[in-house]
Image (spheres, grey):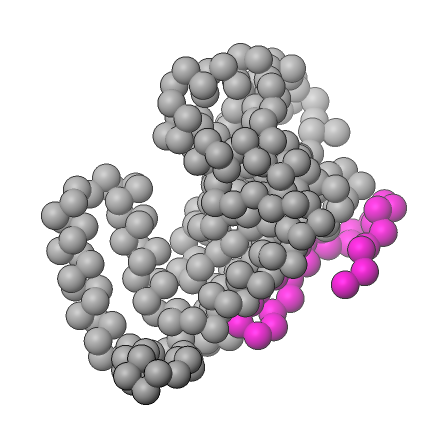
Amino acid sequence: PPRLSQTEPPEGAPVIQLSIADGVAEIVLDAPQKMNALDEAALAELGEAYAEASAGVETGEVRAVLLRGEGRGFCAGRDISHVTPADDDATAYLRDRVTPVLRTMSEIPVPTFAAVQGACLGVGLGLAIATDVVYVAENAKIGSPFANLGATLDSGGHWLFTERLGAHRTLDLIYTAELISGAEAVQAGLFSRAVPAEELLEFTRAKAAQVASGATLAFRASKELVRQIRDERVGLWESLDAENVAQGDLCGTADYAEGFKAFQEKRKPEFTGRG
């Protein structure tokens, strides 16, 4: 599709765009003139877009979600262009505006994907953290520039970096404000795959479309099992027990029957994503 203009949008124009087609809800951060930095209104729009996508999950219309940013950058973080530090309540902004949106994104039950190019910083990094599978452009820029603002990393950045990079590398990035490339981020285990920037959107759309035509209920089960391991720190045997139950639950679904039948008939399965 043609690129949208990077001129200032009309006053009151939506910053978040949502379209649903062929089982994929594509959500677009559409403020390229400011690297898709998000203010309170844009965050509210983003939460509404994910809520609408969630409603589509319940009807079977949405079986995967793809998040992307228009223009050169994915998301440069919070829009601070009109923020006065003396009047700013950063805790309230993060707690009451940002965190609920990240939770909404993370809790949507179907597979979610993000295509990350250019700047992915602050709240933008949080959007990536709240997404299941993140594909990044090789030349994306990821890190913590907050040392230059007298602020600290937020939106889950400390957790992601410490979990994947360890304490020493995390504090190195925070103290120095140095950014790493998408290729380096993937090599370090932060995100899933790095691809050339010019191929990123096509690549991510293809993967999301592939998953949207797959066994959605099985993917939902795996997403919940992974969440338990990540957030509840369940151990091997507890997770294995949960897997056993999940597999038994799937036995009674149409997609499970179709998958086995297709295997036995040596053909490609045709999944509906329903029970």
Q: Say which quadrant the C terminus sits in.
A: bottom left
Residue 72 visible in image: yes
| Residue at 15% in and 62% down | 244
Residue 128 located left or right of residue 271? right
| Residue at 34% in and 69% down | 217
| In the depicted structure, whether residue 232 falls above or below residue 90 | below
Q: How many marks?
A: 0
| Residue at 54% in and 67% down | 209
Where residue 13 appears, as percent x and y from the top left, is: 78, 54
Residue 98 magenta: no
Residue 20 magenta: yes
Where residue 111 appears, as percent x and y from the top left, is: 44, 59
Residues in magenta, as a range: 1-29
**In the image, farthest residue toward the front:** 266
| In the depicted structure, whether residue 98 falls above or below residue 1 | above
| Residue at 38% in and 19% down | 167
Q: Looking at the rendering, which quadrant does residue 43 occupy? A: top right
Where residue 14 appears, as percent x and y from the top left, is: 73, 54
Seen from the viewer's position, the closer of residues 264 and 232 is 264
| In the depicted structure, whether residue 228 falls above or below residue 211 | above
Seen from the viewer's position, the closer of residues 140 and 157 is 140
Seen from the viewer's position, the closer of residues 217 and 49 is 217
Where residue 38 appears, as percent x and y from the top left, is: 66, 40
Residue 123 visible in image: no
